[in-house]
Image (cartoon, rainbow, N blue to C red):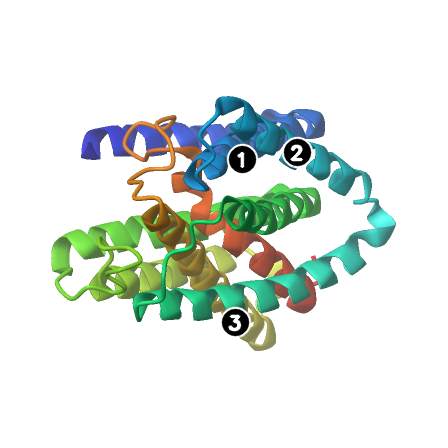
Amino acid sequence: MFKARILTSIGLIFGVFGLTHFASNLVVVAVFTGVLFLSGLEWAAMAGLQLFRTRLAFAVLLCVLSCFGIYGLSPGFDSAIQYWLGVYCLLFWGSISIWICYYQMGAPAVKNQLVLCCLGMLVLLPFFLSIVLIWRSGPIGFLTLILVVSAVDVFAFLGGRKWGKSKFVSLVSPGKTWAGVKVGFLGALIVGNLLYLSFEEFLSLKFFLYWNLTLISTIFAAILGDLLESMVKRFGNIKNSGVVLPGHGGVLDRIDSLCAAAPVFLFFNSMFLGS
């Protein structure tokens, strides 16, 4: 399992670098839409939709709505969209953090399929729009986000294996430990600051503080995204969202952190760094 996880991760890294360096904008949007489609299928399964055609309808609806979203992403409206995505991310993910705490304290699981499908819409559509906007601002921001969020996952995994004893939120995600969360947070913070050194136009104390506020917010959001997917899987007693990625599970198991981190990164990056 560990070997498969490493090999899949290496393949994904090459895929991301290939996407940023060689793919056209049309190909990139097509890839993002494909990821959204597969994520929609997996979320529908986690929501309890049994029939494939209903899962397919949910995934297609996501893609159709995303097309309307892309149509609205004209350059003149980018700043307004980034602002409202920021407002959304603060309110929505703040509410999700409260929900996770209540579930950890014994709140009942949510089984209503409509509620869970609406939740999936609220998670996946803003993620898609955010990742497109981040890509539009340039491959550097996109790669930075991917590397920081991946660092959270990798360092949390290694820290949990090495020092993990005390459980973090056992009812939400039994495998997560306080050691894993702390090591993941610090590791991603270090990676993010190493990346910051390559931004020559932003090397000042003011932008260093802004960047670290962006990093901290993005890392916290990444952890929340991971916990939300884990909680939804607990609702349906599901271990993995799918089987597409060997060693990882499904597409959602790989991008759950990104779903929360992307709109947060976009908001703070646009507010402080103006890109």
Which three-letter amino acid code belongs to the residue tagged 3? Leu
Label 2 – label 1 distance at C-alpha = 9 Å
Foreground residue among 45 and 16: 45
* Disc assigned to residue 213: 3
* Disc assigned to residue 90: none
Instruction: Please tell me whether mark 3 sits on a helix, a strand or a loop.
Output: helix
149 vs 13: above or below? below
- Quadrant position of residue 4: top left
Residue that mark 1 sits on: 40
Residue lying at 57% horizontally and 35% vertically, measured from the top left: 36
Q: Earlier in the sequence, mark 1 or mark 3?
A: 1
Q: Would you say 131 lies left or right of 41 here?
A: right
Foreground residue among 176 and 190: 176
Crowd around label 3: few <14 · some 14–19 · many ≥20 (10 Å): some
For the N terminus, the image quarter is: top left
248 vs 187: above or below? above
Residue 34 in the image, given as x and y percentages of width and height: 57, 27
Crowd around label 2: few <14 · some 14–19 · many ≥20 (10 Å): some
Q: Would you say 152 lies left or right of 31 here?
A: left
Using the rendered image of the protein, determine whether residue 273 is visible from the camera's viewpoint.
Answer: no
Residue 83 in the image, given as x and y percentages of width and height: 73, 63
Residue lying at 51% horizontally and 29% vertically, measured from the top left: 38
Instruction: Please tell me whether mark 1 sits on a helix, a strand or a loop.
Output: helix
In this rendering, which labeled residue sits more in front, label 1 or label 3? 1
Residue 250 in the image, given as x and y percentages of width and height: 39, 33
* Disc assigned to residue 61: 2
Foreground residue among 47 and 125: 47
Tags 2 and 1 touching, CB below 8 Å: yes
Label 1 – label 3 distance at C-alpha = 31 Å
Q: Earlier in the sequence, mark 2 or mark 1?
A: 1
Crowd around label 1: few <14 · some 14–19 · many ≥20 (10 Å): many
